[in-house]
Amino acid sequence: MSERGNVSVLVAAAVVLGGLLCVGFARLEGAATAKARAETAADAAALSAASALGDGESPAAAMQAAQLTAAQNGARLVTCRCTGADAVVTVAVDAAQARARATVSSPPFG
């Protein structure tokens, strides 16, 4: 095999390796983005549910508020537990899941 042939094989291997690395990094970035979106949606859904509880609405109404807010943030509500002054939700975006909790508190001067 000539030197030119040896270099061609090395260049081809380097190109393939570079392509595989790019695909791997793209998948990692996609997973990180989905996790961040899930965390944001979970926070918003928990706050929405807690707000509904604070307004005197039923736990079922609070769950509907959380479900709507999760959907508006591109997520799917997986679980929602609204008891007393606490709202705990889990949402999913693609394969990523996130959990958040919000608690209703009385105003400091009210």
Image (cartoon, rainbow, N blue to C red):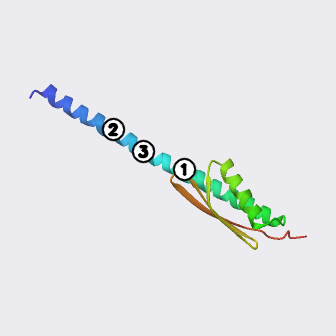
User: What residue did someone put label 3 on?
Assistant: 25
Gap between marks 3 and 1 measured at Cα: 14 Å
- Of 9 and 84, which appears nearest the observer? 84
What label does residue 34 carry, if any? Answer: 1
Tell me which amino acid carries mark 2: Gly
Give x and y (percent) for residue 42.
Answer: 64, 58
Image coordinates of residue 47 in percent, x first then y, are 73, 60
Q: Amino acid under label 1? A: Ala
User: Residue drawn 53% across and 50% down?
Assistant: 94
In this view, the residue in front, 13 or 82, is 82
Q: What element carries label 1?
A: helix
Label 3 secondary element: helix
Q: Position of residue 52 (x, y in %)?
A: 79, 62
Q: Badge 2 local density, few (<14 within 10 Å), some, or many (20+)?
A: few
According to the picture, the residue beneath numbered tag 2 turns out to be 18
The reply to whether the C-beta atoms of the residues labelled 3 and 1 are less than 8 Å apart is: no
What residue do we see at 59% from left, 51% from top?
37
Element at badge 2? helix
Callouts 1 and 2 close, C-beta under 8 Å = no
Look at the image and tell me in which quarter the C terminus lies: bottom right
Give the spatial CA distance, label 1 vs label 2. Answer: 24 Å
Q: Which one is in front in this view, the residue at disc 3 or the one at disc 1?
A: 1
